[in-house]
Image (cartoon, rainbow, N blue to C red):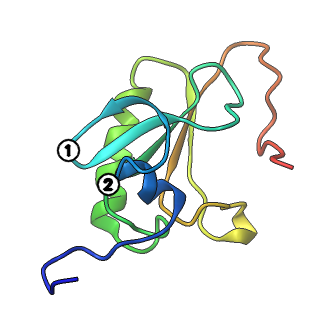
Amino acid sequence: MSMTSPPRYDCPFCKIVRGEAPADVVHEWSDALAFVPLNPVTPGHVLVIPRVHVADVGHDPEVSAAAMRRAAELAADTFCNVITSRGSAATQTVFHLHYHVVPRRPGDALSLPWDVR
């Protein structure tokens, strides 16, 4: 790897960004991707991730803010929860910053946090 090459991370979301893992991508920007998670909790649930590897919302405020802007764009036309977690104690399971945009409907009976087990 040359000194100018970005570091190569082996996390599942980095693999999606590089096109090495499948994903149902619903929106792309120059700095972020939105895709359907493996187990969406409501119809329309998507994850928004930065194209660069940042472990969580606390590691790089500029990248976090840029990815949140993209999540906000998707959230603008729906009632929803926009959620991120930092660390395993906060239920983070993939250590690449991601925002859940979870559309909500009256009576959908989704209680938060949802149980992923």
- How far apart marks 1 and 2 lie (CA) works out to 8 Å
Q: How many marks?
A: 2
Which quadrant would residue 27 be assigned to in this image? top left
* Residue to which mark 2 is pinned: 51
**Image position of 26 with respect to 65: above or below:** above
Q: Is residue 5 left or right of residue 68?
A: left
Which quadrant would residue 34 be assigned to in this image? top left
Residue 36 at x, y percent in the picture: 54, 32
Element at label 2 = loop
Tell me which amino acid carries mark 2: Arg
Numbered tag placed on residue 30 in the rendering: 1
State the residue at coordinates (46%, 71%): 58
State the residue at coordinates (29%, 35%): 28
Tell me which amino acid carries mark 1: Ser
Residue 102 at x, y percent in the picture: 60, 31
**Image position of 11 with respect to 1: above or below:** above
Residue 17 at x, y percent in the picture: 37, 50
Q: Is residue 100 left or right of residue 76?
A: right
Which quadrant would residue 1 be assigned to in this image? bottom left
Q: Earlier in the sequence, mark 1 or mark 2?
A: 1
Element at label 1 = loop
**Image position of 60 with respect to 16: above or below:** below
Dots 1, 2 in contact, CB < 8 A: yes
Crowd around label 2: few <14 · some 14–19 · many ≥20 (10 Å): many
Q: Residue furthest top?
A: 106
